[in-house]
Image (cartoon, helix red, strand yellow):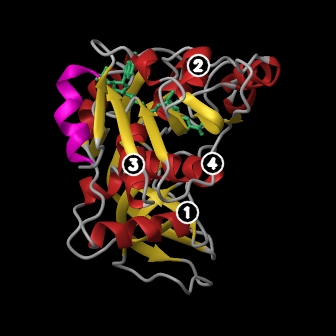
């Protein structure tokens, strides 16, 4: 099968398309013919070994598993002898896992208990591939925050993969959502359900001090104390992009005399979340945002766009 391999850490140029053996499913696994995947923040961070501790988990000198890709949409090509949930021809979408990776290839074998679920009828593979990473991450963090209907939620980085999903999911949970993005994305963020959109290139965020029950900083671009200033006393700050060293620092950081619950950490998708997104999509309550779609052969361009910090929603790749 064809796969995109990153056999060294570095820029998009380390990726090459190669022929590799097609995996065979074990008894508890499904073999999936992948039709679409996405190049996400996790992929470019692993490829660049950014942050450095990526090397501790994925290999000190080069990636141990050179096929990146944590999300997929595809079709069951074969099932192992013990598989009962799925059959050949089922269309599935979801996560491989942040450690397993492997979705930037034509086939993958995954345990049937994995973080994926059947695709709804009528959903395109490209749309399905654009849902798991952003929506899965946003759902996890909003769940940890214990968000309830009627709360005021600010999503910073509202046009990215996580941010565009967070705006839609917070709205579905009954929040009054304020999105923050740059001028070119204001209309999009409104269309996703934000009642107020602030333009970080023009608007003064300090005018909204103590304005929000929950602040979800998705991109790690707003300084910690500026985030804290936006949260009401007793509110919650989600730092979706924080790294472990930052998290340790936060425990000892001043919160400006306020009680602010700070949430960070690593999250990943679950099958239950994918089922929830299926149901929301069927009711037309969420929609994936796709910046561009590239064929697998042009995956270097997809990586370059994904690490630009200015993609809108997801960057999708399609398999031959
Ligand atoms: N903790 C976890 O388990 C976990 C899981 C998933 C992702 N993450 C992390 O979450 C972060 C976001 O991922 P993502 O895929 O959503 O990123 P992304 O899609 O690449 O984010 C791009 C967006 O960021 C916006 N942006 C860039 N600079 C900004 C600024 N100064 N102020 C406000 N917005 C700005 C851009 O908007 P404009 O073009 O309008 O500027 C763009 O739409 C990454 O660091 C990723 O590693 C963490």
Q: Is mark 3 within 8 Å of ligand 1?
A: no
Q: Earlier in the sequence, mark 3 or mark 4?
A: 4
Can see residue 293? no
Q: Position of residue 252 (x, y in %)?
A: 82, 19
Residue identified by numbered label 3: 176
Q: Earlier in the sequence, mark 1 or mark 4?
A: 1
Q: Tell me the crowding category of disc 2: few under 14, some 14 to 19, or many 20 or more residues within 10 angstroms, Cα based.
A: some
Q: Given this view, does label 3 or label 2 mark the residue nearer the observer?
A: 3
Q: Earlier in the sequence, mark 3 or mark 2?
A: 2
Between 120 and 8, the residue placed more toward the observer is: 120
Q: Earlier in the sequence, mark 2 or mark 1?
A: 2
Q: Is residue 245 within the magenta segment?
A: no
Residue 50 marker: 2
SS for callout 2 = loop
The prevailing secondary structure element of the residues shown in magenta is helix
Range shown magenta: 182-192
Between 59 and 274, the residue placed more toward the observer is: 274
Residue identified by numbered label 1: 115
Q: Given this view, does label 3 or label 4 mark the residue nearer the observer?
A: 3
Question: In the image, what residue occupies the spot 25% across and 35% down?
Answer: 297
Which image quadrant is residue 179 in? top left
Q: Tell me the crowding category of disc 3: few under 14, some 14 to 19, or many 20 or more residues within 10 angstroms, Cα based.
A: many
Question: In the image, what residue occupies the spot 63% across and 48% down?
Answer: 145
Q: Is residue 184 within the magenta segment?
A: yes
Q: Earlier in the sequence, mark 4 or mark 2?
A: 2
Q: Given this view, does label 4 or label 2 mark the residue nearer the observer?
A: 4
């Amino acid at each position: 099968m064809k796969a995109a391999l990153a056999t060294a850490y570095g820029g998009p140029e380390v990726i090459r398309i190669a022929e590799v053996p097609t995996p065979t499913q074990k008894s508890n696994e499904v073999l999936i013919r992948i039709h679409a995947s996405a190049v996400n923040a996790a992929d470019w961070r692993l490829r660049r070994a950014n942050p450095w501790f990526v090397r501790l988990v994925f290999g000190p000198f080069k990636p141990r598993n050179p096929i990146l890709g944590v999300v997929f949409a595809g079709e069951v090509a074969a099932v192992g002898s013990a598989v009962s949930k799925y059959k050949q021809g089922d269309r599935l979408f979801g996560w491989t896992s942040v450690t397993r990776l492997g979705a930037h290839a034509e086939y993958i074998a995954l345990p049937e208990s994995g973080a994926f679920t059947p695709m709804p009828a009528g959903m395109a593979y490209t749309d399905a591939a654009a849902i798991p990473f952003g929506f899965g991450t946003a759902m996890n963090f909003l769940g940890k925050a214990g968000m309830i209907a009627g709360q005021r939620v600010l999503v910073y980085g509202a046009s990215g993969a996580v941010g565009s999903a967070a705006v839609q999911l917070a709205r579905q949970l009954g929040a009054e959502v304020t999105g923050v993005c740059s001028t070119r994305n204001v209309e999009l963020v409104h269309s996703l359900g934000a009642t107020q959109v602030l333009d970080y290139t023009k608007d003064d965020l300090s005018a909204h001090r103590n304005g929000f029950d929950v602040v979800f900083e998705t991109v790690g671009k707003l300084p910690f104390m500026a985030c804290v200033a936006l949260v009401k006393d007793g509110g919650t700050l989600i730092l979706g992009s924080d790294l472990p060293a930052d998290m340790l620092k936060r425990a000892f950081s001043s919160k400006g005399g306020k009680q602010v619950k700070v949430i960070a950490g690593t999250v990943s998708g679950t099958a239950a979340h994918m089922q929830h997104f299926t149901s929301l999509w069927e009711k037309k309550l969420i929609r994936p945002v796709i910046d561009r779609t590239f064929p697998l052969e042009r995956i270097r361009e997809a990586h370059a766009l994904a690490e630009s910090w200015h993609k809108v929603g997801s960057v999708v790749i399609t398999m031959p």
